[in-house]
Amino acid sequence: MALIPHVAMAYDFSEGGLFFNFNKDGKSVTFTCETPIFFAHDAPAPSQKGYIGDIVIPSTIKHDGKTYKVTAIDEYAFTANSELRSVKIPESVIAIGQFAFMQCFRLESVELPSKLTSISDYAFAESGLKAINIPGKVKRIGVAAFNDCYLKSVDIPNSVTEIGKMAFGSCRSMTSAKLGKSVEKIGEAAFSMCTSLEAITLPASLTEIGEKAFFECGKLKEIIIPAKVKSIGDGAFNYCNELTRLEVAQGNKVYDSPNNCNAIIETATATLVAGTNNSNILETVQRIGSEAFYGCKGMTSVNIPTSVTHIGDHAFFYCTNLRTLTIPSSVTKIDSYAFVGCDSLETVDIANSVKVIGDNAFLHDDYIKMVTIGSGVEEIGTWAFKGLDMVTSIVSKIEDVGNVKMGKDVFDEIDMKACTLYVPRGTASSYRAAPQWRDFKRIVEQ
């Protein structure tokens, strides 16, 4: 998260080695520490000194003859405390501030009060927590609240309606997550890089799944999208390489997965928005969406039907075992980064219908040996074919190469001496005069 802590001093009084700040009501106090550690980008990362071992926070504290109720834990109260092992929080506490337990690396357990209604942003991020009991009145789990913890499982109560961005991201020990029946929103990257997560059931209440929500959940076996879901962010299931079942529940008005296609299709636009290694791209699909097959490393071949007109950005990004690729005669546009990292590709055949090849479309696909560029191409983006180290022949069917809009360094890092450029009969002189094309040392008409 690239946040670096720095130290400041702020508390109103201390009793028995514990530190407090007065609340505005004059009757209650907030539990804090002697030297809170705040986060900045321009300071070293100290370890907080003070609370050590197992801490029990009292429900009341007496100071100068008056008893105060402890109702909150301050922001940064324990941040970067490397000596804290456990904390028991009293029932009187209704709020825990952001960053309160962040980077408490040795913290293994926390008892949360039953009246807590939200878990603040970064509250337990990067801590040593192995288990957590989320109280039944919590409605929101904040941004990165448990990011990069050691949780093995999580049971989210029925009171929760929102799981924030990165809330459980990088919890690599988590094998299961149970979501309560009221969750409506799963935020961006909420469970991303939970690399041990094998099972999760999405509740019927769910309406929104954020971008990269389950990114790199490599052991996840199946996902069923509930009927109320209206929005699925790009890359929600990227790098879920063991995902063999991807379906949409009946009755969904926005998405569908007909004929056991193992893919999610946005019905209004006929766009395939998410797929798996074994998806079947149906003849009804008109567009392969952004990041649709991103990181499908088990995909060895793909049949793109003639109904498809547009291949979105990063659509087949790092499909490392995809071996052959034929772009059908219906496709008119290949977006940026569409086939980057397809390291097993040896031949690429781009149909005559394609007008635009986006920036970096085939960047560093190192094992491609032959590329055929169709006659209809009008624009080739920057670095579209950069770094094709093993390519020995490029066949261009473009008749009027002088009218093709060329990005920067389209063929950068290709061995211009070893690669032969084949062009239509009667066009060699045009190619030898055209910027970038003329860099090929062998231009042969055919």
Image (spheres, helix red, strand yellow):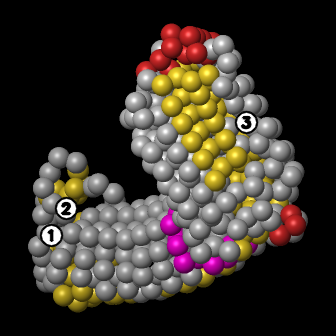
Read off the residue under disc 1: 48
Q: Are marks 1 and 2 in contact (CB under 8 Å)?
A: yes
Residues at marks 1 and 2, CA–CA distance in whole angstroms:
7 Å
Residue found at x 42% / y 43%: 389
- Which residue is pictured at 60% across the width and 47% down the height? 347
| Left or right position of 118 against 309 | left
> Dot 1: within a 10 Å radius of its alpha carbon, few (fewer than 14), some, or many (20 or more) residues?
many
**Label 2 CA crowd tier, 10 Å (few <14, some 14–19, many 20+):** many
Quadrant, the N terminus: bottom left
Residue at (83% x, 56% y) in the render: 282
**Does the magenta segment cover residue 7?**
no
Label located before the other in sequence (3 or 1): 1
- Residue 336 lies left or right of residue 53; in this view the side is right
Q: CA distance from mark 3 to mark 1?
A: 62 Å
The answer to which quarter of the image holds residue 39 is bottom left
| Spot occupied by residue 109 in the image (x, y as percentages of width and height) | 34, 87
Q: Which residues are magenta?
A: 209-224
Residue under the point 49% across and 39% down: 392
Q: Where does residue 335 sit, x and y in percent of width and height? A: 62, 37
Q: Who comes first in sequence, dot 3 or dot 2?
A: 2
Q: Is residue 140 above or below residue 323?
A: below
Secondary structure of the residue carrying tag 1 is loop
Q: Measured from the top left, where is residue 117 in percent x and y?
A: 51, 72
> Mark 3 is on which residue type?
Ala
- Name the residue tied to disc 3: 351
How many residues crowd mark 3 within 10 Å: few (<14), some (14–19), many (20+)? many
Left or right, 414 with respect to 292, comes to: left
Residue 171, horizontal then vertical, whole percent: 42, 75
